Every structure is written in structure tokens, then in C-alpha cells.
Amino acid sequence: MSEALVKSEFALTEAGLQERLGMDMEAIKAQYTPGATDAEFKIYVDQAAANGLDPRKKEIYFVKYNANSPGTSIVGYQTYIARANASGQLNGWNVEPIHDDKDVLTAAKITIHRKDWLHPFEFTVQRAENDTGKSIWAKRPEFMLEKVCMAQGFRLAFPNELGGLPYTSEEASTFTDVQPGAEQGALPAAPTKKPAKAKAPAKAKAPAKTTAKKAEDKLKPAEKKPATTETTVTEILDEVMVGKIIAAFKTVEIFEEDLEQVLGEKITWTEGHRVWALGKYRAIKKATVGVEEFMATRYEPDNF
């Protein structure tokens, strides 16, 4: 890999990136780009080094929706704002939705004030050119359009500082064939793997149970332990438990529609989702995973 410096105050050599992280390339790949091909990892490293993006600070992260889809390096919109601030020329900004006379969202507009410019910079993005109508776009089009407008506006207003940065996840969702959450859907049907039914001997022992044990099983069906892990992860959660999970994520400003983006548009909550989501929630609370990074992940049944 080349170690040539890119003309930017944030640029690093690849050796500098390794020194900053205190890791060699293999360790960086395993930690920050799991599942990446060599070519995808090279792009990730080149973008991180060229722009001085620190993976530890969640300034850049790698997204791969599934093993067959291409991997993408993205940044959070906060990185754009931070870099604009670091230039010393940002003097305020504002983004607002635009509605037509029927109160239908049609566009979003950002106004950016630079200290070294006489007039404010204004930029507008059209909903028709960005809204895919899928996943979170269908749920929160205004939120998504404003994020796209922010990223594109800041990149144009601060070309030297932001011109080479990767896209945000909101921008990437407008042109990628893989929409956020589109390939998650329902969990694979249990019949494709039937190790549980293969263990018929376990059921044959049922007569050996005491009468008291049988009664206990009838009184506590939810506590009855399934024969295999697969049965456990596909167990459907009740509305009370789902409500608790949604309420917990609201405390970290991740809402139900955000969870649908990550877990699947037509999600049927199962024990597998609960375990996976709980682990991510704890990581967010401990600040080992950022909200933007969480929003860029996608639940996969075999990786909870």
C-alpha cells in the first residue's frame, strides 16, 4: 500500500495511521473492518489515512450489509461539522425542511455562514432526487433529507477540509442497491435447519417426568427451555418485552423507526433480536459503540 501523503492538514501515512492506533494492518482489519475483502480494506485504510479519520473516535466505520454485498466506508455527519469547526471559519449554520402549499415535504435547505465569506452559503437538496421510499426514508423522510442536505452542503462550503471524506450513511442509502434493512426481513425459517427435531429421544423421555414436573411445565410454558439454541433465538417476544427494549433505546435517542432500520423493516421480534439489541444497547451506554455506528449496522440472525 502506498504511503504517499494526501494534501490535507489531516493527512497521515498508513504507517502514521498504524502508529496512531497502536495496531498493525492485520489487527486494524480484524477490529474495524470484519468481513472486508482486501480491496475494501485498502479503500478503508486509504480514506482513513488521507483524511486523518480515527476509527476509535467513530469518525469512520465500515459497513457490509451481508457477505454478498459490497462493503462501504462511511462517516457520521458529526465529523463534517467537527472538521468545519476545526477550520476556524465556521460562523453558524442552519438546516430546514421545505414544504409545498399542501404541506408536503419537497426539499431541505442548509445555510452556512463562513467568517471569510461576505455572504452566507445556501444549498438545497430535492426530496425527489434522494428519497428511496424504503426503510427509514419511508418512516422519517424529513430527518433523512436534512442529513443528506447537511453532508452535501458542508462538503461544498468547506471543500479543502471535507472534499475527500467518505459519504454519510444517509447519502449512501440514496444510491446503493442495498437499502438499509432491506435484506434483513424475517428470520430464516426454522425448517431449513432441523437439529431440534432430530433429537427425538429427548421427547421420548417425557413419560419419565413426574406429575409435578408436568404441571410445572404447563404453568410455565414461557420458561420451558427449548431443546436447541435455534428454537431459543426464534422464540417470539411478547409486546411487553418489545416495549421495554424500545423504551431503553429511546434513552440513548434511538427510536422505534431507527430500530426497524437496523433490525428489519418488517421485524418480528424474537429472542435472537432481544439478545443482539441488548448487547448493542449496553455497548452504546458504555460508549464503546456510537449511535451513528449502531445505525450503520444490520442485524443478522447468525451474528447475535
Image (cartoon, grey):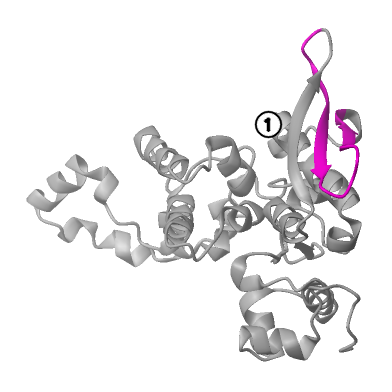
Q: Residue at x 69, y 81 (%)?
A: 29
Q: Residue at x 77, y 53 (%)?
A: 168
Query: Which quadrant of the figure has residue 130?
Result: top right
Whether residue 291 is visible here, answered yes or no, is yes
Q: Residue at x 85, y 78 (%)?
A: 39
Q: Is residue 67 above or below residue 206?
A: below
Q: Is residue 285 left or right of residue 303?
A: left
Residue 51 percent coordinates (x, y): 80, 71
Question: Residue at the top extreme?
Answer: 102
- Closer to the camera in the image, 81 or 36: 81
The boundaries of the magenta stretch are 102-127
Residue 201 percent coordinates (x, y): 33, 66
Q: Report the amino acid beneath label 1.
A: Arg
Residue underneath mark 1: 140
Query: Which quadrant of the figure has residue 75?
Result: bottom right
Residue 266 percent coordinates (x, y): 62, 37
Q: Is residue 241 left or right of residue 99?
A: left
- For the residue carrying disc 1, how many other residues have a C-alpha within 10 Å: few (<14), some (14-19), or many (20+)? few
Q: Is residue 133 left or right of residue 22?
A: right
**In which quadrant is the N terminus drawn?**
bottom right
124 magenta-colored? yes
Q: Is residue 141 above or below residue 11?
A: above
Magenta stretch, overall SS: strand
Residue 243 percent coordinates (x, y): 40, 35
Q: Is residue 241 above or below residue 29?
A: above
114 magenta-colored? yes
Q: Residue at x 63, y 83 (%)?
A: 21
Whether residue 178 is visible here, answered yes or no, is no
- Closer to the camera in the image, 273 or 135: 135
